[in-house]
Amino acid sequence: MACFKNTKYKNPGFILLTCLICFMLTSCVTERRFSFEVLTPASLPIASSIQNISLINHGLKAKGDSAGSYYSFINKIAYDSVPIDTMLTYSCLYGLLDIIEQSNRFNVVSGPLHTPTFNNQKLPSILPFDTLQSLSGNPLTHAAIVLEGVETFDAFDYSNSLDGSYFTNLDILVQSKWRIYALDTREVILRQTRIDTISWYSAGASWDKANENIPDRYVALEQAASEAGSVFGKLITPSYRKVNRIWFVTDNPSMQKAADYVQKGDWTSAASIWNGLATAHKNNLASLAAFNMALTCELKGELELAIYWIERSCELKLSEKNQLYKTKLQERVAQLNVLEAQLKIQNN
């Protein structure tokens, strides 16, 4: 049995009541998550002088090639003789094209085009510059992005648990080979071979249910090739990527009202409440409101103002989360400077 030395606190009921009052006076903080897309720089940027490009498919098999592919079905290797190289290569190029069109970094003046074959023979792996210029069909073309081939290996497998549930998964490995030619300087400026893995998972109480979210093999190959092209596109041109952020809600009535506005998509009205809380108080609530203000500013693209608010959040109450968010915002400001150079954005 607990022993209380001070007779004033001998009554266990008084202790319980005191704890209850303290709990009621303590603000309950809820962390909520929010995701959105931001434009990020290319990690393998191409010289800014290169703007007009052509896309060329040099990955089609020669006539007579079965163009089949090996795959695994429940740990058994098989061979598919269905010609799929046309679908794979064009899906890959259109995945690349989607990313290029989103960023406006390049002007695609021709393509995707495919290289011809002569007497059932392909052109050499390294294409002559005169041939590339002729294929592009535009004298203003600065560079040609050439897909030299796409190979895939897909594996389907399953497992089941003691309760009778089934688990299925499909993994596709996509190898894509790329070469970029600068036509003005007549040089190869980039060559890359990539291996990307795209996966699907599903589960269900029966075999049929467990396969509902697994696409048809041909559709899966098409999606995987397109994703491989998208991944390459994100290396050579600025692209949108999803970022994950957090914001805070407490049991404070004003914070609850701000949260209601956010649920309606009205960040401006929510920010007017957070601004008041962050400037009128100097406590944990004000720190959380300032944190939320930083996110609001980031969503509007006002990164310098977002850093101001996260610094205020840190001043009011330093935490691991506002320190981490400050670092992320600083990284975005640094990326913005790189983006301006890559996209030639002029500040107003």
Image (cartoon, helix red, strand yellow):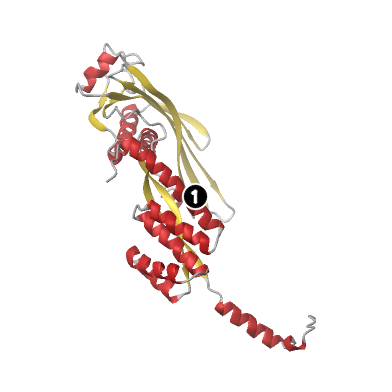
Q: Position of residue 329 (x, y in %)?
A: 44, 50
Q: Position of residue 186 (x, y in %)?
A: 31, 16
Q: Position of residue 170 (x, y in %)?
A: 46, 41
Q: Quadrant of the N terminus?
A: bottom right
* Residue displayed at 46% across by 61% down: 291
* Residue displayed at 35% across by 15% down: 126
Instruction: Examine the image and state in which quarter residue 253 appears.
Output: bottom left
Q: Is residue 65 visible?
A: no
Give the residue pinned by disc 1.
327
* Residue displayed at 50% across by 30% down: 77
Image: 227 above or below 295: above
Q: Is residue 7 visible?
A: yes
Q: Position of residue 48 (x, y in %)?
A: 31, 30
Q: Is residue 3 left or right of residue 95?
A: right
Q: Tag 1: residue type?
A: Thr
Count of picture labels: 1
* Residue displayed at 31% across by 28% down: 86
Image: 157 above or below 277: above
